[in-house]
Image: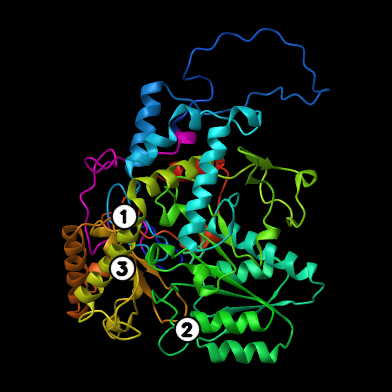
């Protein structure tokens, strides 16, 4: 049996839980698949290519002369390799994915169909502008929806993820402060913020000052005002996540915005949780100056290994002038694309540029397809259903699991802590791993940090009642097992996954990114010992 550094088994077949082993290592439909480097052959090629014509090398002696050593398989072997690998994967298409703060919802197939329309799928970012008016029209229409849904007046479309959007919004704020000739070096970040918020502020050279959470998990405007006073004239912005990472709407958001504006600072809102409030509240009306929207969360474009992110940033009047290049503007009758500073109008002062081109076109198509197919009433209903589903899970579990902030309604995600596991001998991590044996991706664990042993569940609106009932019943069964002393169900879990407990810390801190063939000296002593 092999162990990781925490003494957890990483391979099946512990004495406590004998597992039927097979000759192949396969477990019926669950195939054991080696890496392509292990099974591919470098001396073959999966396709028949003509011998290349002799060409004159023009790289001045820097040409690669040795073979690339790429592993190859035949077409049927290639097919099997990737299909088998994919079956070791957990995806929103295979089951409920309750990862709080990540909004893992269904990606409607209509969006995929639209993204594959050749006029969108086959265009190139370097194509002449005159050949792609439809793409610009689509970007402008999506931008219009985003501004209307958020009650703002400008939007930067190019950021490629939520965190990238944060950077964009904060760079606009930095530029606005510079333009005013002010020296403001501090960004206030509540404790309940997503980790990317303080990281963004720090990356841009701001000093992060933390604001403690109230006992009920929300931000107290008095605490914000106190920090503004302590740092008189130095506060550049506040970064607030709303709904926050405890799944709660910040009830005093308007008072907080007023305090920030009164201090001459800007109000950045992390809008990654917009899924809870689309069609219900407009961040612009709440005093927000900049907010990124994760198209890959709220507007259902695939993410988390399924596709790239997209994080447009909406901007208030106070920041609109500083939106980065490139952007699209309504010209005389036609849309104009502003790509260089020479095209700028009076008053437009972009802080620079975030990306080479216009952003994630494929995601724009999917997001607009989602918006148009839902309509504004449908988007509002999606938010309501997301909140309803989270509360359904909350009510189904609150007698057995523990709610850190009491039994009142949450937004689109429900936060439990691990007090219910106290004295059971089952750790929070064990509990999550046992969910894998039951066929569920665990919820977000140990985040947010304001709560001990946090378990943040976001079911999203796309789960049916039957699916939620089974999920709730499964968690109830696990909790009762833990409380009745069946620690064995948890200690070595997952027992049934293709891989058991991996050393996640090592994997994150010291990832092995390059495959090296095992050297004969590594292999031989073992073989000799056998
Ligand atoms: C997901 C998320 C982010 C970061 O978004 P990425 O697209 O992963 O960069 C930021 N804040 C919150 C609250 C989030 O949930």
Residue that mark 3 sits on: 387
Task: Between residue 183 and residue 1, name the one nearer to us.
Answer: 183
User: Can residue 209 be seen in the rendering of this structure?
Assistant: no
Whether residue 476 is visible here, answered yes or no, is: yes
- Measuring from the top left, give residue 50's x and y in whole percent: 56, 8
Q: Dot 3: few (<14), some (14–19), or many (≥20) neighbours within 10 Å?
A: many
Above or below, 491 relative to 10: below
Q: Give the range drawn in magenta.
A: 9-38
**In which quadrant of the rendered image does the N terminus lie?**
bottom left
Identify the residue under disc 1.
Answer: 378
Determine the CA span between mark 1 and mark 3. 14 Å
Residue that appears at 27% across and 41% down: 26
Residue 271 is labelled as none
Q: Is residue 145 left or right of residue 514?
A: left
Q: Is the magenta stretch mostly helix, strand or loop?
A: loop
Seen at 58% across and 45% down, the residue is 359
Q: Quadrant of the C terminus?
A: top left
Mark 2 nearby-residue class (10 Å; few <14, some 14–19, many ≥20): few
Give me the residue at 42% from left, 58% from top: 502
Is residue 2 shown above or below 514? below
> In the displayed image of the protein, which residue is found farthest to the front?
332
SS at badge 3: helix
């Amino acid at each position: 049996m092999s162990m990781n550094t925490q003494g957890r088994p990483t391979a099946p077949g512990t004495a406590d839980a004998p597992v039927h082993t097979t000759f192949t290592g396969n477990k019926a439909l669950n195939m054991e698949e080696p890496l392509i480097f292990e099974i591919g052959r470098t001396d073959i090629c999966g396709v028949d290519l003509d011998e290349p014509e002799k060409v004159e090398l023009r790289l001045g002696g820097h040409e690669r002369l040795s073979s690339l050593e790429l592993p190859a398989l035949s077409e049927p072997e290639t097919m099997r390799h990737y299909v088998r690998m994919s079956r070791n994967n957990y995806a929103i298409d295979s089951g409920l994915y309750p990862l709080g703060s990540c909004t893992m919802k269904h990606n409607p197939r209509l969006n995929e169909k639209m993204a594959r329309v050749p006029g969108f799928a086959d265009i190139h970012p370097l194509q002449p502008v005159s050949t792609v008016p439809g793409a610009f029209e689509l970007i402008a229409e999506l931008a219009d929806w985003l501004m209307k849904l958020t009650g703002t007046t400008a939007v930067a479309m190019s950021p490629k993820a939520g965190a990238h959007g944060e950077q964009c919004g904060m760079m606009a704020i930095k530029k606005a402060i510079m333009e005013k000739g002010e020296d403001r070096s501090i960004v206030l970040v509540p404790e309940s913020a997503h980790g990317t918020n303080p990281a963004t502020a720090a990356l841009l050279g701001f000093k992060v000052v933390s604001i403690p959470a109230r006992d009920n998990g929300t931000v107290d405007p008095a605490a914000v005002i106190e920090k503004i006073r302590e740092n008189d004239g130095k506060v550049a912005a506040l970064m607030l996540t709303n709904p926050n990472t405890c799944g709660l709407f910040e009830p005093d958001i308007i008072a907080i915005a007023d305090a920030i504006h009164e201090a001459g600072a800007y109000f950045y809102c992390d809008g990654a949780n917009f899924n809870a409030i689309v069609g219900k509240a407009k961040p612009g009306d709440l005093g927000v100056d900049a907010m990124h929207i994760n198209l890959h969360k709220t507007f259902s474009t695939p993410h988390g290994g399924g596709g790239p992110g997209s994080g447009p940033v909406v901007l208030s009047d106070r920041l609109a002038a500083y939106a980065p290049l490139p952007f699209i503007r309504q010209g005389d009758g036609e849309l104009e694309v502003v790509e260089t500073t020479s095209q700028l109008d009076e008053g437009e002062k972009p802080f620079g540029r975030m990306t080479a081109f216009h952003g994630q076109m494929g995601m724009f198509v999917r997001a607009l397809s989602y918006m148009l197919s839902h309509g504004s009433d449908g988007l509002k209903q999606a938010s309501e259903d997301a909140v309803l589903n989270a509360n359904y899970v909350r009510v189904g579990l609150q007698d057995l699991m523990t709610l850190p902030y009491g039994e009142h309604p949450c937004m689109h995600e429900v936060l439990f802590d691990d007090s219910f596991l106290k004295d059971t001998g089952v750790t929070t991590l064990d509990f999550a791993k046992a969910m894998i044996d039951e066929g569920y991706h665990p919820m977000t664990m140990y985040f947010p940090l304001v709560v001990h042993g946090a378990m943040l569940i976001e079911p999203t609106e796309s789960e049916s009642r039957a699916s939620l009932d089974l999920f709730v019943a499964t968690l109830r069964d696990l909790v009762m097992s833990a409380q009745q002393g069946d620690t064995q169900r948890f200690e070595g879990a997952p027992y049934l996954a293709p891989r058991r407990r991996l050393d996640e810390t090592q994997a994150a801190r010291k990832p092995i990114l390059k495959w090296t063939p095992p050297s004969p000296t590594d292999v031989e002593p073992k073989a000799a010992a056998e």
